[in-house]
Image: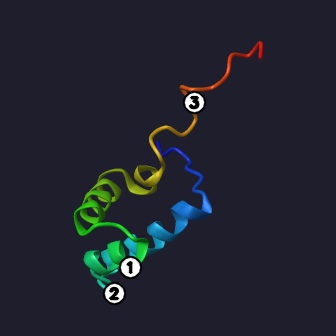
Amino acid sequence: MSEEVTLTIQEQKPLRLRNEVESGRLTAVRAAESMGLAERHGYRLLARYRREGAAGLVHGNRGRPLPRRLPQEV
């Protein structure tokens, strides 16, 4: 059973680049450079994409309330 994931525009570019890396048209180093990331972080994101698919590219805090939000009464 797969869960539907909605990606923002900012999350779609890395997905396209990772698809190109998976198909062999682009290296992981070039993909990381084009996203402005360090090579090591690019490899970490690629590993998470391989493990979790597109859902791995979604920010981990999505859907959670901000910790510094003002109380509801304010």
Residue at image coords 34%, 76%? 33
Q: Which mark is residue 25?
A: 2
Q: Is residue 73 left or right of residue 61?
A: right
Q: Is residue 6 left or right of residue 13?
A: right
Crowd around label 3: few <14 · some 14–19 · many ≥20 (10 Å): few
**Is the Cβ of the residue at disc 2 closer than 8 Å to that at disc 1?**
yes
Indicate the quadrant where residue 39 lies. Answer: bottom left
For label 1, the residue is 20
Of mark 2 and mark 3, the one earlier in the sequence is: 2
**Is the Cβ of the residue at disc 2 closer than 8 Å to that at disc 3?**
no
Q: Which is closer to the viewer, label 3 or label 1?
A: 3
Q: Which is closer to the viewer, label 2 or label 3?
A: 3
Q: Seen from this angle, which residue lies furthest right?
A: 74
For label 3, the residue is 66
Q: Classify mark 1: helix, strand or loop.
A: helix
Of mark 3 and mark 1, the one earlier in the sequence is: 1
Q: Amino acid at mark 2?
A: Arg
Q: Which mark is residue 47?
A: none
Is 52 in front, or is 59?
A: 59
- How far separated are the C-alphas under marks 2 and 1? 5 Å
